[in-house]
Amino acid sequence: MIICICRRINEAGVQAAIEAGARSPEAVQAHHGCEFNCGRCRTAMGEMISETMDAMPPEPGLVAAE
């Protein structure tokens, strides 16, 4: 499914950007070498980022050395 009509970015493209480290809609656009045009895709991208991050296991916390 197309997420960003203006820049032709689909779900797979958004997911690829997230896997490459994008943590905001702006970072997804930057990953693809573009900027927002109308901005309607921001919400969908943000939701995909949140869902992906929620599904990831938590990173181990730091432990103080003795």
Image (cartoon, rainbow, N blue to C red):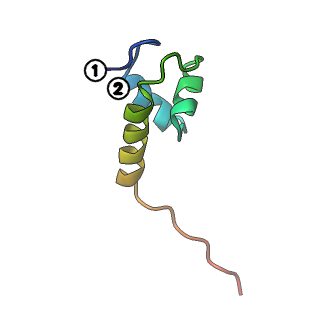
- Secondary structure category for the residue under label 1: loop
Choose between 28 and 36: the one closer to the eye: 36
Residue under numbered circle 1: 1
Q: Relative to residue 5, is residue 61 depicted above or below?
A: below
Count of labels shown?
2
Q: Residue furthest bottom?
A: 66
Q: Are marks 2 and 1 in contact (CB under 8 Å)?
A: yes
Q: What percent of the width, then of the height, locates residue 34?
A: 58, 17
Q: Residue at x 61, y 72 (%)?
A: 62
Choose between 57 and 30: the one closer to the eye: 30
Q: Residue at x 47, y 37 (%)?
A: 19
**Which quadrant would the C terminus be assigned to in this image?**
bottom right
Rendering quarter of residue 61 = bottom right
Label 1 environment density (alpha carbons within 10 Å; few <14, some 14–19, many ≥20) = few
Q: What percent of the width, then of the height, locates residue 41?
A: 41, 26
Q: What percent of the width, then of the height, locates residue 47?
A: 37, 40
Which callout, 2 or 1, points at the residue further toward the start of the chain?
Answer: 1
Rendering quarter of residue 27 = top right
45 vs 32, left or right, is: left
Q: What percent of the width, then of the height, locates residue 3?
A: 36, 22
Label 2 environment density (alpha carbons within 10 Å; few <14, some 14–19, many ≥20) = some
Residue under numbered circle 2: 11
Choose between 39 and 56: the one closer to the eye: 39
What is the distance, in whole Å, between disc 2 and disc 1 at their CAs?
6 Å
**Which quadrant would the N terminus be assigned to in this image?**
top left
